[in-house]
Amino acid sequence: MSSPTNDSPSLADQRAAVTREAILKATQDLLVNEHPAAISVPAVARGAGVSVRTVYRYFPNKQALLDAIANYFPEKADVYVSQTFESVDTSREALVRLWNTFDENRVAVRAEHLSTAGRDLRERRLTETRTQIHKMVSKTVPFGTEADRERLTDALVAVTASSMFLELTDRLGHNSTDAAHLAIWISNALLEKFASDHSPANPSTAKGPTR
C-alpha cells in the first residue's frame, strides 16, 4: 500500500483552495450581474459565504481580486492575437475566433478593463496587435505615406480591440460572432477608403491625403 507523498496537498491546503475559488467565483458573478461600482470586498464576501476578514486573508484589496480574475485569460488571448492579423484573408476568420474566445471568457475580459494587472496585460497585448496590424496594412496597401499607414493602423486597432467587443456585445446587444463580422465590415471599409484615397491610380493622391 503506497503512502502519501510530501507533494500531496494537506486538508488545510485543500480547504484554502476551495475558499479561494469561492471568493473568485463570487467576484466573477458580480462582474456578470452587477455594475462595476457594486464590486466591493463586503459584496464578494456575501457572495462567497465567508467573512470580509477571510477575503482579505486571500486578497489584500479589491484590485488584487480583479487582478486574479484578469490573469485567468491572457495566455489564450495572446495566442489568438499573434495569429489574427497576418493578412486580410486570415484576419477575418481569426477575429471571429478571438471574439468568441472573449465571449467564453467575458468575465476576465471585463476584469482586464477594471484592474491594474488587466490594464498592464492589455498594454502588452497592444504592442503585439499593433505590430501585426501594421504589417498587414503595409502589405495590403503599400502606398501613401508611412504616417498615413500609421493612422490606418491605429483605426484598425481600435475597431478590433476588446473594448470594441464589449461595446458591441454588452452595450449594443450583438452576439460575439455578429459583433466580429461588424468589426470586420468596418475594417474593410477603412481599408477600401484608404486604398481609394491613396492609390497611385488616383489623380487626387498627388494633392495630398484627404481629410
Image (spheres, grey):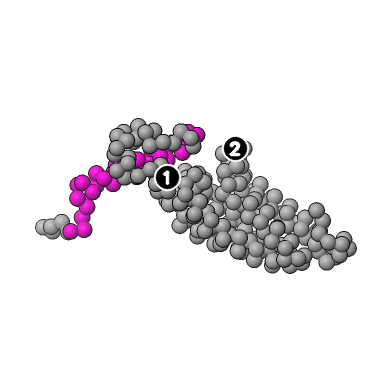
The stretch drawn in magenta includes residue 15: yes
* Residue 76 - label: none
Residue 116, given in percent of the width and then of the height, sits at 47, 49
The stretch drawn in magenta includes residue 133: no
Magenta stretch mostly in which secondary structure? helix
Seen from the viewer's position, the closer of residues 42 and 166 is 42
Q: Secondary structure at mark 1?
A: helix
Kind of residue at disc 1: Gln
Which residues make up the magenta segment? 6-35
> What residue appears at the point 28 percent right and 46 percent down from the top-left corner?
17
Kind of residue at disc 2: Arg
Please identify the residue farthest to the left as the structure is shown. 1
Residue 191 visible somewhere in the drawing: yes
Residue 125, given in percent of the width and then of the height, sits at 53, 58
Q: Secondary structure at mark 2?
A: helix
Seen from the viewer's position, the closer of residues 160 and 101 is 160
Q: From mark 1 to mark 2, how far is it between C-alphas?
A: 24 Å
* Residue 171 - label: 2
Is 7 situated above or below 57? below
* Image quadrant assignment for residue 196: bottom right
